[in-house]
Image (cartoon, helix red, strand yellow):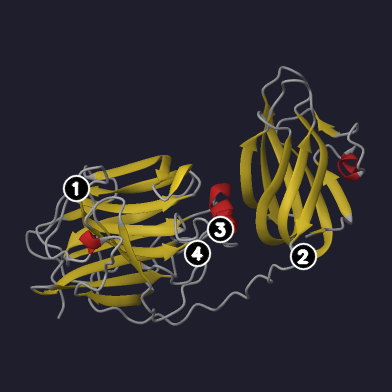
């Protein structure tokens, strides 16, 4: 770990900002306005691992702050928001991004004092063992998807709708949307924020098609801590589409769902899962037809489309297909419909293990009414659009 050399300092007040790097903890940068900021610049883009902040200590005053990084000093990517209520010294704030500028913004304090913002010390750390950021890959030419008709949102349908089957759309009476804290059975005591939404309506068969478009502008610090610690790299690390299952509770018939999992940072690890009962999972990695790139908290702050098709193809086998639309949503606010098949796998009792024996049987009948889109460790501002579930006619 190496301290990154600073070549420039600036602030919203235009004065006293050099105090944040002079190693004198009796001096500080102060500003009497809300949303005041101070930033430092490096000579070039650096791989920033962590930053350390010491806020001004005015007795019991606490600050509501946020941290952002940028490559150009204009467009900043949000890293973390928090309060200094319990600790004026905030250390090892994980960044894990290339940047030339680091900015701390103090939005408000809880004092009637005129001093709205005060920072005593700010430094950035480079991890010399961190590999450089990957070069963005061009979006491959999408593979045409059979069907051609679209749903009420204009999203391409992968399969033909079954007569009399369910058809649910975002914000209709079957839709739910929650954002609250949840824990993990495998990491006792840990609580993270979870965005979960979806539909409560049971299909007549397991033959369903689920779609949505998602934009994750900010991954919470809890995600980066889990990634860095190594304790939860397979937990809370992506979007999970769960279908044909029961609610997640302590009952023996809970869950019972097929899950397509799309990691925030790309890759294909544990991309196909089953859960029964909650929270017992069988997770496997299915080879994919193309490499999924990082889609959350990206420079372009764009949407990405995700889909799942579950089909009963014989009395004892089910096929699960995962779809991705990297084109996202156009400037006109319409789905790009550049859908490509990410993977397809047939379940004939190979998705299961000794740790989750109840996942071994093939789910040939719907176990419950729940279709769910779940994302842990994402900000409340995370957006979902054009979500739907349709009962469909399976293809051979």
Mark pair 2, 3: CA separation: 23 Å
Vertical relation: 104 (above or below) 324: above
Q: Residues within 10 Å of mark 1 (few under 14, many from 20)?
A: few
User: Quick one: label 4 or label 1, which is nearer the N terminus?
Assistant: 1
Marks 2 & 1, CB-CB < 8 Å contact:
no
Which comes before the other along the chain, label 3 or label 1?
Answer: 3
Residue 261 vs residue 136, the one in the foreground:
261
Tell me how far mark 2 sits from mark 1, CA to CA.
53 Å
Q: Kindly identify which residue carries mark 1.
A: 252
Q: Quadrant of the C terminus?
A: bottom left
Q: Quick one: label 2 or label 1, which is nearer the N terminus?
A: 2
Label 4 vs label 1: CA separation? 35 Å
Tell me the quarter of the picture where residue 122 sits. Answer: top right
- Any mark on residue 45, and which? 2
Q: Nearer the viewer, mark 3 or mark 1?
A: 1
Left or right relative to 358: residue 238: right
Residue 103 position in % (x across, y down): 74, 47
Residue 227 tag number: 3
Percent from the top left, x then y, of residue 229?
Answer: 58, 55
Q: Nearer the viewer, residue 297 or 248?
A: 248
- From where the camera sits, is residue 154 visible? no
User: x, y percentage for residue 326?
Assistant: 44, 70
Compared to 341, does 203 lie above or below? above
Mark 4, secondary structure of its residue? loop
User: Can you identify the residue that label 4 sits on?
Assistant: 295
The quadrant where residue 332 appears? bottom left
Secondary-structure class at tag 1: loop
Q: Residue at x 47, y 81 (%)?
A: 140
- Residue at image coords 50%, 64%: 295
Above-or-below relation of 74 to 394: above
């Amino acid at each position: 770990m190496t301290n990154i050399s600073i070549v420039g300092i600036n602030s919203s007040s235009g004065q006293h900002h050099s105090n944040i790097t002079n190693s004198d903890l009796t001096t500080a940068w102060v500003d009497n306005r809300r949303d005041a900021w101070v930033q430092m610049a490096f000579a070039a883009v650096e791989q920033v691992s962590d930053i350390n902040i010491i806020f001004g200590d005015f007795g019991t005053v606490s600050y509501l702050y946020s941290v952002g990084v940028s490559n150009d000093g204009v467009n900043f990517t949000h890293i973390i928001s928090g309060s200094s209520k319990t600790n004026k010294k905030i250390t090892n704030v994980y960044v894990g991004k290339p940047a030339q500028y680091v900015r701390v913004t103090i939005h408000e304090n809880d004092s009637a004092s005129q001093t709205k913002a005060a920072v005593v010390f700010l430094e950035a750390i480079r991890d010399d063992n961190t590999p450089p950021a990957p070069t963005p890959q061009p979006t491959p030419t999408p593979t045409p998807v059979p069907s051609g008709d679209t749903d009420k949102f204009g999203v391409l349908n992968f399969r033909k709708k079954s007569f009399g089957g369910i058809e649910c759309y975002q914000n209709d009476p079957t839709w739910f949307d929650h954002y609250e804290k949840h824990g993990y059975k495998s990491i006792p005591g840990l609580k993270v924020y979870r965005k979960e939404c979806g539909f409560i309506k049971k299909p007549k068969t397991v033959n369903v098609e689920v779609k949505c478009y998602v934009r994750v502008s900010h991954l919470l610090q809890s995600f980066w801590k889990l990634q860095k610690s190594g304790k939860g790299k397979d937990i809370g690390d992506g979007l999970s589409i769960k279908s044909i299952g029961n609610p997640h509770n302590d009952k023996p018939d809970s869950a019972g769902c097929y899950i397509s999992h799309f990691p925030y940072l790309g890759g294909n690890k544990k991309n196909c899962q089953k859960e029964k009962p909650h929270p017992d999972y069988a997770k496997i990695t299915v080879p994919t037809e193309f490499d999924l790139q990082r889609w959350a908290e990206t420079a372009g702050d764009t949407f990405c489309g995700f889909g799942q098709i579950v089909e009963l193809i014989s009395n004892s086998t089910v096929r699960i297909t995962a779809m991705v639309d990297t084109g996202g949503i156009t400037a006109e606010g319409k789905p790009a419909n550049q859908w490509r098949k990410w993977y397809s796998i047939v379940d004939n009792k190979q998705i299961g293990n000794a740790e989750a024996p109840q996942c071994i049987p093939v789910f040939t009948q719907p176990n419950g009414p729940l279709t769910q889109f779940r994302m842990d460790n994402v900000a409340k501002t995370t957006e979902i659009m054009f979500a739907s579930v349709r009962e469909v006619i399976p293809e051979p």
